[in-house]
């Protein structure tokens, strides 16, 4: 039987692949860094250091960095949070639309931005706006569902696995803290806690069966 200490250590990721969590955090951090760097390009001499010596080149570089950084942050957030496939697909589609907007910006700015016979400012802005709204909506739903799962009227859900069978038991935050403290201290209480949680899980299953 799996010990509760292993289950507790994995609970931090709630069934998610730790590599995905770390990759998402890294991607989100890089996205935030790109946005900050984009602001610095147009407000400090950083643009010149990156080869954008004139104002138009600096603005184009800043727009590109910011345009790539925002969807990267959205992707990072949804990768870190426990999200559904629908939310993952929604954020990916939104990020893809943002990339279309960035690509159009590369073609349009500055010659075909707002002047000339065939301007692309509107198409670029709409593609990026729609992509941002779509990605933000699914990130928002992922965050909302995450908070609901982790705070159902002050309760915490624990998942127990034994011989390939998974059981879920709901405990109060005070009970969860007591269990976690017992696991960390390893004072010989682990087996008793495991039996207690298993009995509660079996009782909950029997009650649902009666209903």
Image (tube, grey):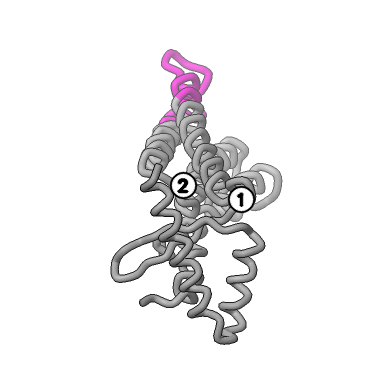
**Residue corresponding to mark 1:** 37
**Residue corresponding to mark 2:** 75
> Residue reaching furthest front?
210
> Residue reaching furthest right?
43
Taking the magenta stretch, the answer to whether it contains residue 129 is: no
The residue segment tinted magenta is 104-126
In which quadrant of the rendered image does the C terminus lie?
top left
Q: Earlier in the sequence, mark 2 or mark 1?
A: 1
Q: Nearer the viewer, residue 208 or 193?
A: 208
Q: Is residue 21 visible?
A: no
Is 129 placed left or right of 185 in the picture? left
Instruction: Tell me the distance, in whole angstroms, between the alpha carbons under discs 2 and 1.
Output: 19 Å
Q: Nearer the viewer, residue 191 or 75?
A: 191
Q: Secondary structure at mark 1?
A: helix
Residue 149 place in picture, x, y as percent:
53, 48
Q: Nearer the viewer, residue 36 or 160?
A: 160
Residue 147 place in picture, x, y as percent:
58, 46
Which residue does the image show at 59% across and 79% down from the upper left? 184
Instruction: Tell me: residue 9, above or below residue 104.
Output: below
């Amino acid at each position: 039987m799996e010990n509760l200490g292993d289950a507790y250590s994995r609970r931090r990721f709630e069934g998610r692949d730790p590599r995905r969590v770390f990759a998402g955090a890294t991607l989100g951090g890089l996205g935030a860094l790109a946005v900050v760097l984009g602001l610095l390009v147009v407000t400090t001499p950083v643009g010149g250091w990156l080869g954008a010596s004139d104002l138009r080149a600096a603005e184009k570089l800043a727009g590109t960095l910011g345009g790539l950084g925002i969807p990267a942050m959205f992707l990072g957030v949804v990768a870190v949070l426990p999200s559904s496939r629908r939310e993952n697909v929604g954020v990916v589609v939104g990020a893809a639309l943002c990339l279309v907007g960035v690509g159009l910006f590369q073609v349009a700015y500055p010659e075909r931005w707002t002047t000339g016979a065939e301007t692309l400012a509107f198409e670029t802005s709409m593609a990026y706006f729609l992509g941002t709204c779509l990605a933000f909506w699914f990130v928002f739903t992922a965050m909302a569902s995450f908070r609901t799962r982790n705070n159902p009227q002050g309760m915490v859900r624990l998942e127990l696995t034994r011989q390939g069978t998974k059981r879920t038991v709901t405990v109060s935050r005070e009970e969860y803290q007591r269990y976690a403290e017992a696991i960390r201290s390893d004072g010989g209480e682990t087996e008793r806690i495991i039996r207690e949680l298993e009995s509660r899980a079996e009782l909950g299953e029997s009650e649902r069966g009666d209903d």
